Image (cartoon, grey):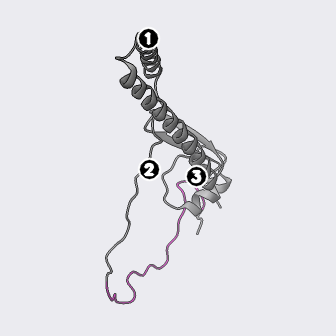
Amino acid sequence: EYLSNWDRILFFVCHSQDFMNNVCTHIVRLDATYKKLRYYSGNYDTYVQTRRDQDMVQMRQYEAEQKDIAEIKDFIARFGHGTAKMVKQAQSREKLLQKKLEAGLTPMPEQDPQYDWSFPDAGQLPVPVLSIENVSFAYPGGKELY
């Protein structure tokens, strides 16, 4: 509750989706493909949906470009050594391919690494494993929160 009412910028790393949904109003992500910070409005669930949509569009564009390049290369390979008319068309497509490559291609969407957070069974543990009593918390210079 304290952080959800925070009226300043706060950068943090968190692994709790519930916490980020209740606290975050904007998400900033370092995009390794483009080496830029990407800004997303909304909570974590909104960020996930927006990013999924953007990745889908980028993947479609990437696949379309790759298909187009494969078709051009296939045409050049088949007709690059035929009649003068076909050789001229193949050379024209080769120039088109070169222009596409110089302009830059759409990279594949960056896939987030998947981690397996499974731990071996610890077996029977004595009760209590950990006991904490008389604990309080306060931010530096602030009143005690609990």
Q: Which residues are magenta?
A: 123-143
| Residue 130 position in % (x across, y down) | 39, 80
| Residue 118 position in % (x across, y down) | 36, 70
- How crowded pointer 1 is (Cα within 10 Å; few <14, some 14-19, many 20+) is rated as some
What's under tag 1, amino acid-wise?
A: Lys
Of pointers 2 and 3, the one earlier in the residue sequence:
3
Measure the C-alpha gap from mark 1 to mark 3. 48 Å
Above or below, comparing residue 102 to residue 20 in the picture = above
Numbered tag placed on residue 48 in the rendering: 3
The image quadrant where one finds the C terminus is bottom right
| Residue 105 position in % (x across, y down) | 46, 28
Please indicate, yes or no, whether residue 58 appears anywhere in the rendered image: yes
Numbered tag placed on residue 112 in the rendering: 2
Numbered tag placed on residue 127 in the rendering: none
Circles 1 and 2: CB atoms closer than 8 Å: no
Q: Is residue 79 left or right of residue 6?
A: left
Q: Nearer the viewer, residue 73 or 84?
A: 84
What's under tag 3, amino acid-wise?
A: Val
Residue at position x 42%, y 32% from top?
70
In the picture, residue 142 is in which quadrant? bottom right
Q: Is residue 66 left or right of residue 61?
A: left
Q: Nearer the viewer, residue 132 or 106?
A: 106
Measure the C-alpha gap from mark 2 to mark 3. 12 Å
Residue at position x 48%, y 59% from top?
15
What's under tag 2, amino acid-wise?
A: Asp
Q: Nearer the viewer, residue 30 or 85?
A: 85
Residue under pointer 1: 88
Q: Nearer the viewer, residue 11 or 144?
A: 11
Please indicate, yes or no, whether residue 3 appears anywhere in the rendered image: no
Dot 2 falls on a residue whose secondary structure is loop
Dot 1 falls on a residue whose secondary structure is helix
- How crowded pointer 2 is (Cα within 10 Å; few <14, some 14-19, many 20+) is rated as few
